[in-house]
Image (cartoon, grey):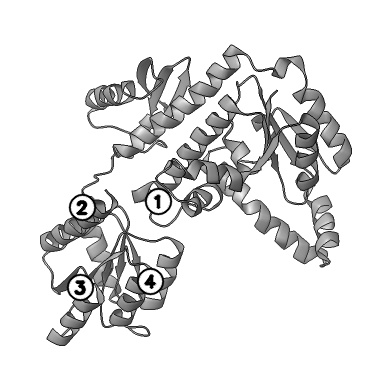
Amino acid sequence: MPVVTITSGAFCAADQVAPAVARELGCQMLDDAALIKRVAVDAPMNEAKLRRALSDKPGVFNNFSREKERGLAWLKLGLAKLLGEDDAVLLGLSGMLAPAGVGHLLRVCLIAETRWRAKAAAGALKVDEKEALNRLRREDEPAFLLAEHLRRGDPWSGDHYDILIPLDKTPPEQAVQLILEHARGRQLRTTPDSLAAAADLATAARVELALLDKGHNPRDLSVEVRGGAARIAINKKVMMLSRLEDDLKRLVMGVDGVKSVAVEVGPGYYQADVYLKTDFELPSKVLLVDDEREFVQTLSERLLMREIGSAVVYDGQEALSLVAEDEPEVVVLDLKMPGIDGIEVLRRLKRDHPAVEVIILTGHGSAKDRQTCLELGAFAYLEKPVDIDELSATMRAANEKLQGRRA
């Protein structure tokens, strides 16, 4: 019995079709939330982070933390496990991670013309067609964000699926029968070859995680595994290509399931960007908060020269909003700002996000302010003008504390 993934545009009757297919096949039905719950048992990421990796745009710190890539690699591993063990119908965006070439996997897309879906949404929600169209776009946005991240373009393109069913021309009952006909076909039976292809998906996911763990970005190193043979394509300019090739071969050969490794340059290698990997001694998610725009922008540039990337905001309220959306590891915080001052920002950060380390950097503080900040849980209290090496060392020390707490 195959595994069926069903990816659907909003208001395309997927909530009717998927359960009916699972019921007729006599197998379990999972959605994205159920798959995420399974994956979170083994992954060093909680369900919320895995959910954001699948459905949200990359966070402001993702260029440094690679949290989205890590989450997607764990979800691919979970999907591979499902393909290797269970008969199931999987409904949701996670089906977009399913590769071609797994013989017992049927990838289905349910979609319809936008105006038809807007009319369906208007009837279901009892709103006018304009509001229904806005709702439709909001609900479809995660699929477009994931497709963009996977470099696929249109998430509803038939190139990415085995069957694309137009719901504006096909009643749900007929869509169920079409899926069942294909799912029960001889060509979708589980075979040793199809199980090997599922194992290759798991191996590729483990390779991506191994690359991430050593500071590499899988978006710069495309990974393909066939029959245990891993092929790594380098898609960024590299200063010392042969050294990187040797490093990658040693790293990837240690991954479970890899039998051989080939490293080559991909089409992206000829871009002007220089390939960099993450230094894990440095914090990867740093937020600078200061209303002196020229100062904080210059500070950000000087930190970047030391390979510390950072996001910048200019007031306390903006800082709190950003932290609620994408929690940083280290915050460098000024005290004297319009609106919510630094001490109040520190108080709220340590109350709502106690794991975040906060470094106070101010030119207008006092001995009393210093004592207050340290009592509230600030990691360090520095004064302007600050020596950039001292600030960098303090941030490294804050990161060491974070890593020690996670160990």
Q: Is residue 320 left or right of residue 117?
A: left
3D distance between C-alphas at marks 2 and 4: 23 Å
The numbered mark, 2 or 4, whose residue comes first in the sequence reads 2
Residue 184 lies in quadrant: top right
Asked whether, in this view, residue 1 is left or right of residue 223, the answer is right
* Residue type indicated by callout 3: Leu
> With respect to residue 16, does 101 lie above or below?
above
- Which residue is disc 3 drawn over? 361
Percent across and percent down for residue 286 are 30, 60
Number of the label disc, if any, that sits on residue 305: 2
SS class of the residue under badge 4?
Answer: helix
Q: Percent x, y for residue 243?
A: 22, 25
Tell me the kind of residue under disc 1.
Asn
Which label number is shown at residue 326?
A: none
Where residue 381 appears, as percent x and y from the top left, is: 16, 73
The residue carrying mark 4 is 319
The local crowd at label 4, few if under 14, some if 14 to 19, many if 20 or more residues have their Cα within 10 Å, is many
Foreground of the two, 135 or 400: 400
Residue 62: image tag:
1
Mark pair 2, 1: CA separation: 18 Å
Task: Tell which circle, 1 or 4, labels the residue nearer the N-terminal end.
Answer: 1
Residue 39, horizontal then vertical, whole percent? 50, 41
| Marks 2, 4: nearer the viewer | 4
Decide: marks 4, 3 in contact (CB < 8 A)?
Answer: no
Of labels 1 and 3, earlier in sequence is 1
Q: How many marks?
A: 4
